[in-house]
Amino acid sequence: MIVDSHAHIFEKWSGACGLPSRELHLKYLQKNLTRPAARVFRLRDGASSSAQHLFREGTTTWEGLRTDIDFRVGPYGRIEFRAGGEDYYVQYMPAAMYEIESTPEGMITHMNAAGIDHIVLQAGFTYGYMNDYNALAQRQFPHRFTGLFHVDEARADTDYWMTEANRAIHKLDLKGLYYSVEQFSRYGFDVWMDDERFDGFWSLVEETGRPVFIEFSAIPDYDRPSYVKVMARFGNLVGRYPGIRWVCVMTPPVQFFSSNGQWDIPEPVDAIYRRDNVWLEVCYPISWGGRYDYPYPELQVLVQDLHRLYGAGTLVWGSDMPNVERFCTYKQSLDYVRRYCDSMSESEMDRVLGANLLEILPVPPREA
């Protein structure tokens, strides 16, 4: 059974997508694109450009987002903006996606074509307020989808978000938490994820047995030292909440921890990765498919080095579908591991492509 740890459904991005306003949704999108793996083009002639137009130099919080660029959702998978009298776009979704939308039925069609049995629906406010939509898809298609919930990470301790977390767990029956470190930038990094004020929230997650799919960001300075400090804070949480199962989304980061086809992971981070309740998500074409060509031999060697360092029991495969199709097909995002990472035995490959996730999440067997 092949289980994808990382995929998304979402409503049309031209609207608010469940958030209080369309403008708030655009803010989340703009912040996410300040350092995109997707490329930026000038609209009139397709010339390459830069995401620097989206924010003021020297700023890394929402306060630094430019408000004078007519930031908007365009057609054909594009996010568009205007700067210096020119229109630009980020090719954030596949060019064939005329309207930026990913329905449950459409995702199932992609799954069938690629031979994927089940996917974990991750969340994040870039996609909108996802709890109800993920829960609806999970309820309609329980053999194909397992939904995660999310909260406003930097305000998870407030009554509003504690109530929402309880609703997501006990009423919507969402099976895990998606948690993004990047969202602390909205509030100027006025608090950190391991602060004691969040103890009640993390205790709820631990007591209800929900795994956490945590996506890291090198806040606040977006460099290697910042990433290592974020991981130290994560290590604090892992130590304080040993009952939580943690899946590290798109981890380790190639740009910070790799050299000459091997990993060079700092010892404190390596110690975290070796914890029994921590898994690493193998999900690299979404970030590096714009630099390397399929079948990604540069990424294959890193996946196989992860296998050497941590074993197949620590790794889970993910695609970041449908985003990944701006670089390769859904099937190719699987096959660069399944067909080419030959350091793993058949049983080890089975673990990476689904069996490990089946031990983390309560996935029902697929119906005939």
Image (cartoon, rainbow, N blue to C red):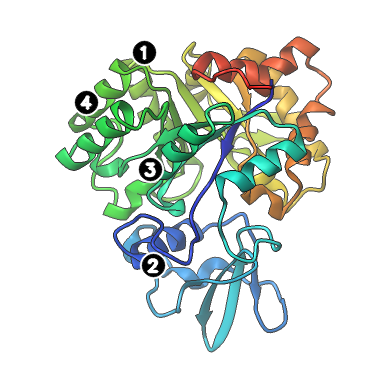
Distance from disc 1 to disc 2, alpha carbons, whole Å, reads: 37 Å
- Residue named by callout 2: 65
Question: Which disc, if any, is residue 199?
Answer: 4
Asked whether 338 or 296 is in front, the reply is 338
Q: Amino acid at mark 1?
A: Pro
Q: Nearer the viewer, residue 288 or 367?
A: 367
Do the residues bearing badges 1 and 4 touch, measured as CB atoms within 8 Å?
no
Q: Quickly name the residue at label 3.
A: 132
Is residue 321 visible in the rendered structure shown here? Answer: no
| Quarter residue 237 falls in | top left
Residue occupied by mark 1: 242
Residue in the foreground of this view, choosing between 181 and 9: 9
Query: Mark 2: which secondary structure?
Result: loop
Residue 325 screen position, x and y as percent: 70, 51
Q: Residue 137 at what x, y percent from top left? A: 49, 39
User: Of the residues shown, which amino acid type is indicated by label 2?
Assistant: Leu
Q: Position of residue 80 (x, y in %)?
A: 55, 73
- Mark 3 and mark 1: Cα distance apart in space: 29 Å
Q: Quadrant of the N terminus?
A: top right
Q: Residue at x 56, y 49 (%)?
A: 103
